Each structure stands twice: as structure tokens, then as C-alpha cells.
Image (cartoon, grey):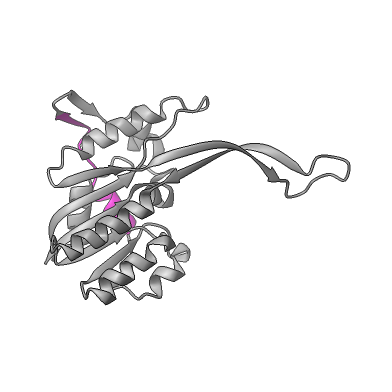
Amino acid sequence: MLTNVYVDGFNLFYGRLKGSPYKWLDLDAFTRRLLPEHEIHRIRYFTANVIAWPSDPDKPNRQDFYLRALSTIPHLSIHLGRFQVSNVRMPLAHPSPDGPRTVEVIKVEEKGTDVNIGAYLLSDALSGDCESSVVISNDADLAEPIRMVCHDHGQPVGIFNPRRRSMGSWQLQQIPPTFFRQIRTSAFDACQFPEKLWDHEGDIQRPASWHPDLWRK
């Protein structure tokens, strides 16, 4: 079955990859392992350019290396949303009786990913670009476009939840999709890029802080 895969990059990263040795994930090998009976037509990867912080100034460089690695996959495209940073006042959970009741915080929001996934999911289904769709995310905001493709258009849509079993989205499971599955840790472990790849800019090296030996000690 000719299948398109839609990857919610931040949902995958914060749901399973952060704090793990599996960040250097080869999405081509990964999707083929998850869907051995499918012919992967295209992979759409959705993310936004991260922002450097004083506590982690190298974060954009690590992301750039990973996006370059993903770009070596011929049938993968990268779709960028954006980060919105603002200063807002938020109420304190436990204010002291004689102290302030609010505090100013830096609020960082990632914008556009859920809208972009929904738009491409619907567009690809309606244009006949694929015979089935698979979404790697547990974002409840995707429930309606998935329902429209699966039930209104009649095209199979499966969901892989990148988070732990106890953190699956109730809204997504209630659609219901064609399938809703967890991802085993062994799939992440088996589908890492080589230490070094190459593109038109030169060599692409796994970020040093992502080396699995640092996480397995």
C-alpha cells in the first residue's frame, strides 16, 4: 500500500527522544521498520527552527545537523512552522500573603505544526497522492483532520503514539483511526543514522552530545 508518513517533530522529540540516546534517528529506516507491509511514498517532517538560549547556545547547530541528515533522504520533505517568544505575566501557584500574585515569564510557543500537518494530510488524500496515511504524533489537535480523511474520505489513517503508553491522546483514540499503536524502544535503537553522512555542503556529523555512549554510561 502506497503510504505517506507525517511526523510531528517536536511531539516525537519531547515525547520520546529527549533524554535518550536515539536523537540521531533515521526516519527512512524508522518508518520502514514500523510499516514493513507498506511502500513508503513520502515522509513529511514538521518542525520549527529552534532558538538559542544562554543555557544552551548550541541548540540551533544541533538541529541544523539533524535537518541536513534528514535532507539526505530523497523522499523526505521538511516543513517549518515558527517559534513565538513573548513576555507574559502568569499567576503564581502559591503566592505568599504579602508578596506579588503574578510573575513575568518568557513564554515560548511553537506555531504552525498542527495546522501544517492537517493541511498536507487532507491535501495529499484528496489529490490521490497516497493510498493510506500514517501520523506519528499524539497531538489531539490533529483529531479532526484525521477523522475527515479516515471517515469522510474513506482513506486509511494510522497513528503511532511516540509517547509512553500512559500518555496516549484520548481524543485520537476515540476517532477511531485505522490503528493506534505504541512505538517500541527497539525501533529507535535499530534505526540510527551512521555517525557521518555527506551532502552538498560537506560532511554531517552526529552532534557530540548526542553520542549514545554518553547516555548509556
**The C terminus - image quarter:** top left
Q: Is residue 42 above or below residue 107?
A: below
Q: Is residue 196 a member of the stretch shown in magenta?
A: yes
Q: Is residue 162 visible?
A: yes
User: Measured from the top left, where is residue 33 in percent x and y?
Assistant: 19, 57
What is the span of residues highlighted in magenta in the rendered image? 184-198
User: Measured from the top left, where is residue 188 in percent x and y?
Assistant: 29, 51
The residue lying at 55 percent from left, 36 percent from top is: 86
Q: Is residue 180 visible?
A: no
Q: Quadrant of residue 198?
A: top left
Q: Is residue 31 a member of the stretch shown in magenta?
A: no
Q: Quadrant of residue 68?
A: top left
In-front residue for pair 122/11: 122
The residue lying at 42 percent from left, 44 percent from top is: 18
Q: Is residue 92 above or below residue 214?
A: below
Q: Quadrant of residue 181?
A: bottom left
The residue lying at 13 percent from left, 64 percent from top is: 128
Q: Would residue 142 be found to the left or right of residue 93 on screen?
A: left
Q: Would residue 190 be found to the left or right of residue 213 on screen?
A: left
Q: Is residue 168 above or below residue 201?
A: below
In-front residue for pair 53/196: 53
User: Measured from the top left, where is residue 114 in percent x and y?
Assistant: 37, 54
User: Measured from the top left, where is residue 1 in percent x and y?
Assistant: 11, 67
